[in-house]
Image (spheres, rainbow, N blue to C red):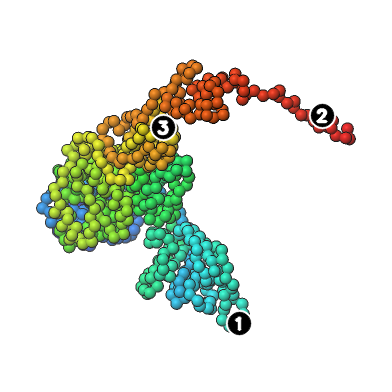
Amino acid sequence: MPKQLILCDCSASQALDAAGLEAATGLPCSRLHSALCTDEIGSAAKAIEGGEAIICCAQEARVFEELATDLEADAPALVDLRDRAGWSDDPAPKLPKMAALLAEAALPPPPEKTLDVVSEGLCLIIGASDVVLPAAEKLAPLLGVTVMLTDDTDPPEAREFDAIRGRITQASGALGQFELRLDALQQVNPGGRGVLSWTASRDGGQTQCDVILDLTGGTPMFPAPQKREGYVRADPGSLSAVSDAVFEAAQLIGTFEKPLYVALEPLICAHSRAEQTGCNKCLDICPTGAISPDGDHVSIDPMICAGCGACAARCPSGAITYDAPPPDMTFRRMQTLASAYRKAGGEVPRLLVHDASFGAEMIRLAARHGRGLPADVIPLEVSALSGFGHAEILAALASGFGAVWVLLSPRTERDALDQEVPLAQAMAGGAAVGMLDLGDPDALCDALYDAQPARALSEPVLPMGSRRQVARLAARALNTGGGTLPLPDAAPYGTVLVNTEACTLCLSCVSLCPSGALMDNEDLPQLRFQEDACLQCGICATICPEKAITLAPQMNLDDSALTQVVLNEEEPFACIECGVLFGSKSTIERITEKLAGKHSMFATSDAAKMIQMCEGCRINAQFHSHDNPFAAGPRPRVRTTEDYLSKRKDH
């Protein structure tokens, strides 16, 4: 049975063109309802029982899901056409936008990758006794509680939970696997009559727990504490905050599914080579500290990773990619939105990228109480705003969008976007790209309605390949004149500049280049370079003993960026014996000048000539010289058991 669109105009507050939607999407439409979630709930039930209903209303998702449960049917697919398109003061037709939203909703969702996390409910509560003891009494029936008192007080007489005193010197881990190191550790001495006492203080204590409830009100134990799962923190001076924290901690017992947000390919990571540090972008940008160096590459702790996506946006090589969903799914969503919009009669759409909480609520409030979104602004909800980098922005423009706006939320990590958006602007060929840092729905409407008219590509391109390949493909489509685009500092694209006067062609840079952008020539002393492969990681500049290499961020849109060019070359030296070319002429002459007649090994003219010989001729000359280093005396006889026994006195 084909899928069917179940339409509702929400008490005649929006106009829906059933025939137009059916023609644009190829899906049959139901009759137009006006109260699908109330008076006409029977029609919704019948559609849900059919199993192929797409209900064009998301506000009453709870009602439809409960109805499906009662009917023992699968929950129906829901698409929000009203808030994102129908409720708008823009007089322009809404059909193209609705067709685009429905086409995107029809895409199959990518499979989710998760990891099971088990929490047995071992909870450590830290803080002053007047705050943590009441919290412990509430949690003790639910969790295995230990309180760590930070003030100078007698041990509590309650034995429903354990109590200690001490100072945390190191903390690591996340929900289900916290590990702590403690100094000045004191435990309760339960023996004796009268007031309980503490044991003697000891350093170097270790403990593990599943949940940490921090009620100290001091410095957080972890970076980005709100993102550390299992670490609950509250202001001890706020009763409501403490109560909320206690309630949250009580829920953290059982088995949880931890999403695997990013994927790592260590082989193409450009972090370091031969202990020489190169790229640190992911290490510098990660708010939770989930990324750490691991030899020539980095490693990511999936338990600590909170899925902000900043590392994937900034990674120059593609070693780290966001995987929930993967980049190709995001590219496909944007291409589907733009294509369906044009096919339904739209001209130049604009893309509004937002998150699932703050941004979605701003759009709902703008629709219900304000002017709503313009008819050409298509919202795209993403799971990680920080992961929407320059490649995604350029892909949207190349797919046919005339402008891309990222709606920030108060909790958005801006470090990555503050670098990615200017990079996209530099490569976008003048297209409108920017961030909207607004907290008022009316201000959002004003910014979108008052924006300059957008222009889109006359012939959109299909974004395919890795993020790096998509960015280059889009940049070439957006800058039809070709040439070279200057880019901001720390951009992952650029060229290598070599001071040929200082370069000795030692080729250290070639041996350590992680991407193969720098190459040698097996037949001639040359340093070759392919700009398209350069990550601007800086390892070549760091390792160069002559400091002859500098980096220049840019985007060369011409085909020359895909070919090898010679950065430095010298005349090869011919062996004085056989004529075989080896090394560079300047290097051999320089070595001869420094060693011939000045070093004991090259004091004679015959020995000095060996510097100017190839490997084979040099070995041959050494073998036939008077002081042949390969010459040696007769080989000693092998010592046997008889030789050993013959020297014993008892034989």
Q: Secondary structure at mark 2?
A: helix
Hey, what amino acid is under mark 2? Glu
Q: Residue at x 26, y 45 (%)?
A: 424
- Viewer-nearest residue: 487 or 154: 487
Number of marks in the rendered image = 3
Decide which of tag 2 and tag 3 comes sooner along the chain.
3
Task: State the residue position of label 2.
Answer: 642
Q: Which residue is mark 3?
A: 504
- State which quarter of the image contains the N terminus: top left
Callout 1: SS: loop
- Residues at marks 2 and 3 touching, judged by CB atoms closer than 8 Å: no
Q: CA distance from mark 3 to mark 1?
A: 83 Å
Where is residue 434? Give x, y as percent: 22, 50
**What's the residue type where badge 1 is placed?**
Arg
Q: Residue at 24% across / 55% down in the picture?
A: 407
- Horizontal and vertical percent position of residue 142: 47, 69
Point out which mark residue 193 bears: 1
Neighbours of disc 1 within 10 Å: few (<14), some (14-19), many (20+):
few
**Percent coordinates x, y for residue 448 in the rendering:** 17, 54
- Outermost residue on the bottom side: it is 194
Residue closest to the eye, 622 or 518? 622
